[in-house]
Image: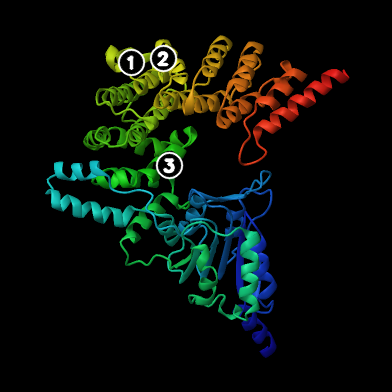
């Protein structure tokens, strides 16, 4: 009995190192090689080929003392692999769900340390902030300007949610979280750095729950930083509780929607700061789920809440960012506050206001093109009242072209061959969303671009390179333009078009010789021009061999 008790206690003292390896395994293997087997047990949570591997770990009752996560983390939404054939990834929403859910109470419950080997994992830059429309809404609600500013600062503190904040919410109460405030070393570099750390006989600190100053010092040049998990007394603790009300997979859909309804009845400034979470949850609701009686009942209550609807739409119309306004309108549609026709009317109203204020830029053009992705919004563009002077401006013309105006589309094609770089740039944005499909238009554009000059020509050629040109007349015109060009940048841009085109149609020994004779040498050595010449030469030899 004594022996059994001793073995049981020894096993109980053994720490579990959990790893989530969606990127490099170098970091995990370094830990495994140097931590004593008698003191540490390693568990890889990722099960290759199984998409629900995190839920599987929860159901198995795994409890982690140390957690290692490895993967790219550039935009803060998920850990992912840099390998093209890798399918595993780890969205932060899944980590949040595991952290919040009663169905996974043990996985992270006894964590002492978390190691986040990915770029920007502890970046403290806020991903959202209380913008000026929030201050205006508070003033309209009766706050003095000074009080509105104080409330905005409080909202930023509670809802700012940087990558660092998100990780602190996911791992509340964890004594030590290691991560990177900027670019992190790749596994091939991080592995040897960890080897040096362990070879210094400092491995005894792992799993202690204390900040390892030697490790931080070793990685300091690579932007390693340290945080601790969120405590219940901090301002963001209530925000985490709100997030968990939507993330907890143990709560019924109707209960979550009741929470959504209550949240929508708060001050609209808070609703705006929580928009990401509300939008993600409501958007994810499937049609079958919506038709369940308990869910239908709550959705009907929300749809008929006229006071909340009125406040929400007033706030949406006052949003500084057109993208935020469009998102709020989209959520209103999903909540039953707007019909499809009413949402389109609101979108056109927003577009009309942007044009009237001369406030259309690149992001607004992209937004309108996206809103009219299926062409339905453009059917009502006659409801817009745009003067001839307004329509002649290239940014406004791009918006109208996104809405399906043939006249404005022609204006954007002319803009691509303009001598004005701003017009060329706007045409590039428009054509990114609405590529040229007509062969005659493409031929006309190609010829027009060959007659341009300066940097604007290079930008226009970069746009043309996206099309696999096969028109012989266009290709020959480009080849002549290459010979005439006096700039290496222009010649490289033309080479970029030709190398992606059906260059075999114009491949001749004379053309190859002409390109070699007239090319402007690049200071950087071999470039795309050399690639084009080699491919043309190969095409000529193939023709001669045939």
Disc 3, disc 1: CB below 8 Å? no
Locate the N terminus and report the quarter of the image it occupies.
bottom right
- Whichever of callouts 2 and 3 sits on the residue coming sooner in the sequence is 3
Looking at the rendered structure, the secondary structure element under dot 2 is: helix
Quadrant in which the C terminus is drawn = top right
| C-alpha gap between disc 1 and disc 2 | 8 Å
Q: Secondary structure at mark 3?
A: helix
- Can you identify the residue that label 3 sits on? 280
Determine which residue is flagged by label 1. Answer: 392
Contact, mark 1 vs mark 2 (Cβ under 8 Å): yes
Picture quarter containing residue 281? top left
Q: Is residue 238 above or below residue 368?
A: below
| 363, 300: nearer the viewer | 363
Q: Which residue is mark 2?
A: 411
**Around disc 3, counting alpha carbons within 10 Å, would you say few (fewer than 14), some (14 to 19), or many (20 or more)?**
few
Which label sits in the foreground, 2 or 3?
2
């Amino acid at each position: 009995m004594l022996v059994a008790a001793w073995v049981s206690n020894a096993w109980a003292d053994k720490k579990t190192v959990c790893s989530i390896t969606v990127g490099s395994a170098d970091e995990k293997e370094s830990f495994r090689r140097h931590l004593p087997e008698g003191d540490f047990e390693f568990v890889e949570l990722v099960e290759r080929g199984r998409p629900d591997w995190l839920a599987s770990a929860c159901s198995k009752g795994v409890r982690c003392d140390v957690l290692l996560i490895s993967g790219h983390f550039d935009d803060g939404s998920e850990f992912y692999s840099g390998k093209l054939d890798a399918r595993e990834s780890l969205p932060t929403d899944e980590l949040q769900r595991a952290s919040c859910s009663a169905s996974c109470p043990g996985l992270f419950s006894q964590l002492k340390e978390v190691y986040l080997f990915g770029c920007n994992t502890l970046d403290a830059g806020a991903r959202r902030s209380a913008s000026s429309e929030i201050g205006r809404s508070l003033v309209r609600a009766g706050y003095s300007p000074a009080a509105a500013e104080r409330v905005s600062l409080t909202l930023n503190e509670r809802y700012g949610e940087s990558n660092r904040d998100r990780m602190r919410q996911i791992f509340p109460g964890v004594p030590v979280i290691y991560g990177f405030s900027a670019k992190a070393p790749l596994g091939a570099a991080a592995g040897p750095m960890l080897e040096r750390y362990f070879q210094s006989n400092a491995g005894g600190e792992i799993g202690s729950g204390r900040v390892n100053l030697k490790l931080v010092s070793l990685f300091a040049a690579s932007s390693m930083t340290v945080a601790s998990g969120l405590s219940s007394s901090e301002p963001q603790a209530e925000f985490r509780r709100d997030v968990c009300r939507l993330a907890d997979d143990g709560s019924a859909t109707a209960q979550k929607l009741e929470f959504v309804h209550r949240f929508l009845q708060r001050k609209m400034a808070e609703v705006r700061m929580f928009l990401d979470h509300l939008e993600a949850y409501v958007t994810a609701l499937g049609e079958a789920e919506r038709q369940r009686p308990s869910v239908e009942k709550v959705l009907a209550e929300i749809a008929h809440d006229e006071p909340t609807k009125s406040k929400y739409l007033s706030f949406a119309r006052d949003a500084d960012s057109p993208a935020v306004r469009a998102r709020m309108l989209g959520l209103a549609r999903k909540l039953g506050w707007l019909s499809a026709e009413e949402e389109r009317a609101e979108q056109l109203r927003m577009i009309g206001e942007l044009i009237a204020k001369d406030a259309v830029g690149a992001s607004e053009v992209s937004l309108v093109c996206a809103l009219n992705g299926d062409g339905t919004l453009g059917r009502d563009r006659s409801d817009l009242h745009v003067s001839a002077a307004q329509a002649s401006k290239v940014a406004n013309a791009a918006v109208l072209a996104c809405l399906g105006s043939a006249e404005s589309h022609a204006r954007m094609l002319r803009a691509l061959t303009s001598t004005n770089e701003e017009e060329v740039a706007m045409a590039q944005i428009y054509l990114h969303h609405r590529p040229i499909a007509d062969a005659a238009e493409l031929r006309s554009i190609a010829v027009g671009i060959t007659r341009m000059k300066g940097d604007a020509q290079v930008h226009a050629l970069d746009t043309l390179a996206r099309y696999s040109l096969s028109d012989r007349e266009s290709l020959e015109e480009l080849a002549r333009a290459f010979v005439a060009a006096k700039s290496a940048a222009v010649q490289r841009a033309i080479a970029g078009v030709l190398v992606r085109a059906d260059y075999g149609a114009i491949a001749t020994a004379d053309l190859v010789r002409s390109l070699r004779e007239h090319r402007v040498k690049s200071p950087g050595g071999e470039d795309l021009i050399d690639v084009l010449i080699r491919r043309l030469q190969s095409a000529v030899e193939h023709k001669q061999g045939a």
